[in-house]
Image (tube, rainbow, N blue to C red):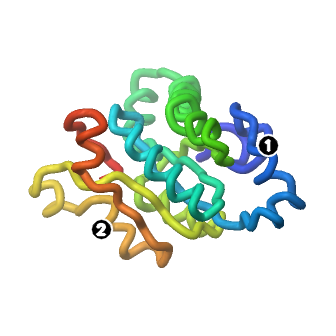
Amino acid sequence: MTVGPEPFAPADMAVPPRAAVTDPEKAHAWGTSMTLVLGADDDDRVGALVDRTAQLALERHASVLVLHAVHRSEVWALASLMIDSRPYLQARRRRLERRVAAPLCSRGIDARAVVQLGEPAHQLAHIAARYGADLIVIGGETHERKHHLVGGGVARRLEHLTAVPVEVVAPAVLGAAAGHSDSHYS
């Protein structure tokens, strides 16, 4: 489930798109046809992920689709308390736009944020396929070994779900950005 209109619909983005990327004539001249998908949690380490994604997008003249997958269990928990999940999901999306998409746009990158329900690896693979992504960017592993014995991290699951290359931003880079923080995108 997407919160709001389709991820790349103009009305979907709170931050104005970069004209050179969204104008077809300029996009052709600029060589923009690449798309990066950034799997982002809403945690304190997102700054390092934004920095690396901005570097990759600028090198490739690519647009960025920022994806945050919300586990269905979170929505079910709200529903069990008879709480409407729509405001919760919309707030997550607005925060993702402020903390991830807006900083990318401020660097001259066409970036949009979308929140979807589902398991992160599956949603990343689905969105990458749907929008013809050239690269998926996610944060590195920060969980204990027992986590990987149970089901592995998102990067490991993506190996089996997509042929799109995955760049994993190293835990040391993420940790340097903001202490240790668990993430379901690792």
Q: How many marks?
A: 2
Closer-to-camera residue (112/127): 112
Taking the spot 44% from the left edge, 51% from the top edge, the residue there is 52
- Badge 1 crowding class, 10 Å Cα cut-off, few under 14, some 14 to 19, many 20 or more, is some
**What label sits on residue 156 in the rendered view?**
2
Q: What is the x, y in percent for residue 3?
A: 62, 38
- Residue occupying the point 74% across, 42% down: 17
Left or right: residue 140 compared with residue 122: left
151 relative to 75, above or below: below
**Among numbered discs 2 and 1, the one appearing first in the sequence:** 1
- Tell me: 140 left or right of 10: left
**Three-letter code, disc 2:** Arg
Q: Position of residue 159 (x, y in %)?
A: 36, 74
The span from disc 2 to disc 1 (Cα, nearest Å) is 33 Å
Which quadrant would residue 71 be assigned to in this image?
A: top left
Residue labelled with disc 1:
10
Residue positioned 52% across, 28% down in the render: 95
Give the side of residue 125 with respect to residue 185, left or right.
right
